[in-house]
Amino acid sequence: MGDARVLTKRKSNTTSLDGKHELLLFGKLITMRSRIAPADYLQAYGLARLVAYFGWTWVGILSQEGDYGRLSTQIFKEEIVDSGACVAFSEIIPTTFSKARTDQILKAVKFSSAKVIAILSFDVYVNPFMEVLAELDLKGKIWIALEAPSVSSKNLIKALDGTLGLVIRNGKMPGFKEFVFSLKPSRFSEDPYIKLFWEEVFACQWTEFSGGQLLVNGSTEGKPSPCSGMENLSDTGIYSDIDDLRVTYNVYKSAYAAAHALHNMLSCHPGHGPFADGSCASSDKYKSWQLLHYVRQVQFQANIQEDIFFDANGYTPPIYDVINWQVKPNGLVNFIKVGSFDTSAPRGLDLVINDSAILWKGGSHQLTRSVCTESCSPGYRKVERRGEPACCFDCLPCSAGEIANQSDSTDCEKCPEDQWPNHSRDKCVPKEIEFLIFSEPMGALLASVAVTGSLLPVTILLIFIKHQDTPIVKANHRTLSYVLLLALAACYLCSLIFIGQPSIWNCMLRQAAFGIMFTFSLSCILAKTTVVVFAFKATKPNSQLKRCVGPKLPNSVVLLSTLLQVMLCISWLACWPPFPEKNITSQLGKIIIECNEGSTKAFWCMLGYMCLLAGISFVIAFLARKLPDSFNEAKYITFSMLVCGSVWISFIPAYLSTRGKHMVAVEIFAILASSTGLVMCMFVPKCYIILLRPDMNTREYLLGSKIFKKR
């Protein structure tokens, strides 16, 4: 629909309502620009709505040269860009043939990745180009057009298979078919157009009338036969679908609009008219602007339940049919209505498509996708390519700790601190909670070693008890050896406290228990070394150390050395008690439940004190290395302290460089390794003599060794 403005007033007796067809109205010819036929730019808008409906985001454009093509292209571009699509290319088809220009357009169409191409041109301009394009046998291309293009070759029919066209709505015109079939030259003998029409349809020639060139199906065929006037239009089959005359139907609506306007104008009663002082227009002397007033007030319903009316601007919203080209196996084309586009309906309800009725190229129901880049899956974000349209982008995975739960996300969202992305990075899930447990392989292995290791000093203790009266057991403070073996067994078992989920009591107990027990073990070793040194030094004449030799010396060394560590641990637990905490930053995707030492200084002071005791024991043992072998444990203590020192020196960097359950495992390993070193270096050699070399476990052998050493 368009405005019904009166453009000119002539002295002839016709009026134009659509710019193409004229009607006789009461002896006046009023030329009006009819908008019963839809405004062309709305078709371009409708094509853009089709693009949005089918989700095509990468579209090529072929438009005709001139203002119409330029305006349609502008409207089409603006609309598809607003809907999120992009233009792959835009080429103008020249009105005059140019091989260079045609080759350029063909190259753009052929090598473009766009699968959908919009034709913003009337077929009279685009058909010659499409004939050339059809020779390329382009596969996978879908065409959408302003109208259903006409065809003249099998190649073009094949190329346009699956095309969608947006055409003027069709409707029935009661009596029109009968009127056309009743046309006879004899009834309209004075009308030369009838005879021209007759010659065209029946490929004949009137003997008394010579029309123009006789074209039948686009070609001239020999000498035509004479026209008799008795030919029957219904026999030709040309107008078998007389209701599919879309332009004619709009002329039909134009005529009815004019008829309703004239009827309303003639029905006016003086004094109740729309003009000055209630006047009406004169039936034989009306003005163009008076008729225009009534035309703009027209409102009626066509025979297909279509409301015809003009808005305040002189337009009426058009309705289009969406036509699908469907090529049959025999090569014939069916134009199937698959939807409609109502420009008066709200956006979202304006376009109605029957998807199941559409057949795409090759008779497929599968919709062809046309995108520059496939959508980014959830878990990825879009990154535009520099210098390319927004529809062309790269998909990059979200960074660690971020998700994208929608397709084509431009940004990723960070997960909460206690959550982490799943494998697909499209959802945040609770972080994995980690701590060393008995059921996992590493925890089970360490626990097994701890329990098995604790049996070693217990077994040695039983051996010593069984052979308690032998010289080698009695030689170096038997009771102190028993206590040391029990302390080492306890050190092994202390490592079990480190396995399992940390709790308040667990965290407070683990470090203090091990620190006190291992300090007690080192105190026993220090006491044994001190006893040996004092015992042999006291044998010298006039030695002042004789008064120190006795059970009080080792007991005092053990109690005093251990008491200092106990006081340190009590102060630690009282002032800065360890506690369990959730570490969410050390390892990505995990929450580490660990014990916070409360005071790092207190922890290292505890370890430092143990190292101090080990160092003192090492120095004293080294000084006692020249004492008689059988009574002297100095070399065994020396080796055990070297092993213990090596373990804890290696422990420091390993402990500081690990987190979570591995840090706990490192400390357990250090406990087990140092305990094993003490047992192996100090007691296994004695067990060897007791069990395998009983000949060496005699007083005579020990005394002989002593005498030999003196010599």
Image (cartoon, rainbow, N blue to C red):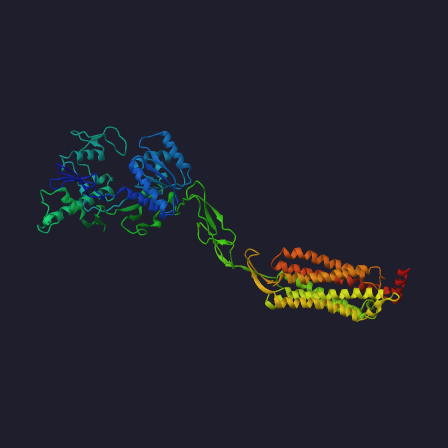
- Whether residue 359 is visible to the viewer of this picture, yes or no, is no
Which quarter of the rendered picture does the N terminus lie within? top left
Number of numbered discs: 0
Q: Position of residue 34 (x, y in %)?
A: 21, 42
Vertical comparison of 525 with 385: above or below: below
Residue that protrudes farthest toward the right in the picture: 711
Q: Position of residue 101 (x, y in %)?
A: 36, 31
- Tell me the quarter of the picture where residue 548 sits: bottom right
Vertical comparison of 423 with 23: above or below: below
Residue at 44 percent of width and 49 percent of height: 410
- Tell me the quarter of the picture where residue 550 sits: bottom right
- Whether residue 429 is visible to the viewer of this picture, yes or no, is yes
Looking at the image, residue 660 sits to the left or right of residue 53; the answer is right
Depth order, front residue of 584/64: 584
Q: Position of residue 7 (x, y in %)?
A: 18, 39
Looking at the image, residue 414 sits to the left or right of residue 61; the answer is right
Which quarter of the rendered picture does the C terminus lie within? bottom right
Q: Position of residue 701 (x, y in %)?
A: 88, 64
Looking at the image, residue 496 sits to the left or right of residue 183; the answer is right
Depth order, front residue of 121/448: 448
Depth order, front residue of 568/251: 568
